[in-house]
Amino acid sequence: MRGGNEKRWSKTSAKHCREPSEAPPRQCNRSILIEPLLFLWGGSEHSGICCAVLSSLLYSIMGLLVKMLARDEIPSFETALCRSALVGIFASFGVLHNGESLLGVQEVRHLLAGRAAAALAANLCFFYSLSEMSLKNAAVINLTSPMFTAIASSLILQESWGGNEFCGMLGSFAGVLLIAQPPFMIGAVRHENLEDDVEMKGSPVAVAVGLLGAACAGCAYTLVRAAGRRGLETAFLPVLWFSFTSVPVAATFLCLLQQPVWPQLHAMLGMAAVGLLGFGGQLLMSRALQLERATRATSMQYLKVLFSFLLSTLFLHESPTWSSVIGALLIVGSTTLIIANIS
C-alpha cells in the first residue's frame, strides 16, 4: 500500500507540483524564476537581441546612477575604478564557478587580449575627445561604433550586412541626433536645453580621435564575436579580461587627474549598484555577441539613448522636446526594423 501511494504521488507531483511532507516545496517557484533566465540566455532565436536590449537598459540605469553620484561630488574616475573592480570580481566568480581558467583556453587568448586592448584604446580616445569637445558631441561620435562594427565584422568574419540593418542603423543614429541635439547641429551658442555655458565643437584632431575610439570599440565587439565562433563558451571571460586593463588605467587617471574621496554610505551603495549594473551590461552584451551577428547586436546600443531619455524624464524631471520625442520614436522604429529581419 505504501509503494502504491508513493507511485501515485510521483505522478501527481510531476503534473501539479503539490506539496507533501517529503517533497521540496521550492521546486516550482525555482523553475518559475530560472526558466525565463534560461530562455533569455539562449532558449530562443531572439535571445541574442534580448540580451543586447537588456544590456542597453542596464547601462542606461547605470548612467543615471553615475549622474546622481556626481551630484555627491564623487570623482568620475573613482566611480569608474569601483565599477571596474567589482566587474572583475563578479566575472572571476563566474569563470571559476564554470570550472574554467581565468585566462581562458589557449585558442582564444589572443582574441581576448585584442578585445581588451581595443576596448581600452576606445575608452582612452573617448576620454580625450571629452576633454576637447562637449559631452554631447563626444557621445554622438562614440555612437558611430555600431557602423564600424558592421564594417569590421564584414571584413574579418564575412558576416553579411543587410539592407534592413543599414537603414535601421542610419535611422537610429538620426534619432540619437534628434535626442542629443549636439552643438555642431545647432551651433556653439547658448541654448536653453544645453547645460554647459560654453559648448566646444572640437578640433579636427579631437573629432578624428573620437572616430578612432569608435572604430576601436567596433573592433572590440567584433573580436568578442570572433572568440565566440572559435569556441568560447562563457560570456564571463571577455568581461574579466577587460577588467584586467580598465582597473589600473582608472586608478592611474584617478591619482593623476582627480582627488579621491571617502564616500558616505549611500554613495557606497550607489557605487556598488553601478558595479553590479556595469557587470550585467557587459555580460549580456558579450552573450549577445555570442548568439547574434555583431551588426544586429551592437545596433541595439542606440536604445541606450532612448532609455536614458526616458529615465531622465521620469527621475530627473527633464522636460522632453518635440525633437527628442520624434528621435525616440525613430529609434524604436529603426530597431524594430532590425529585429523584424531576424529569421
Image (cartoon, grey):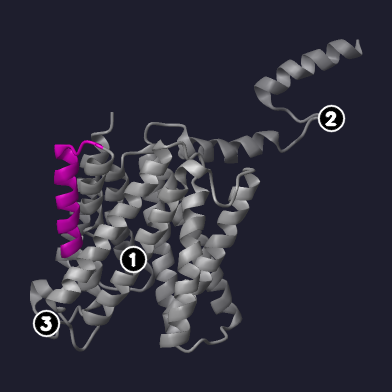
Eye-nearest disc, 3 or 2: 3
Q: Quadrant of the C terminus?
A: top left
Residue 101 in picture, x, y percent from top left? 60, 48
Q: Quadrant of residue 9?
A: top right
Which residue is more in the foreground, 25 or 283? 283
Give the residues in magenta. Answer: 158-177
Eye-nearest disc, 3 or 1: 1
Q: In terms of sequence position, does the residue under pointer 1 or pointer 2 come before the other?
A: 2
Q: In terms of sequence position, does the residue under pointer 3 or pointer 2 come before the other?
A: 2
Kind of residue at badge 3:
Ala
Q: Main secondary structure of the magenta part?
A: helix
SS for callout 2: loop
Kind of residue at badge 2:
Glu
SS for callout 3: loop
The Cα–Cα distance between marks 1 and 2, rounded to whole angstroms, is 58 Å
The residue where tag 2 is placed is 22
The residue where tag 3 is placed is 188
Which residue is more in the foreground, 229 or 33? 229
Asked if residue 69 shows in the view, the reply is: no
297 vs 276, left or right, is: left
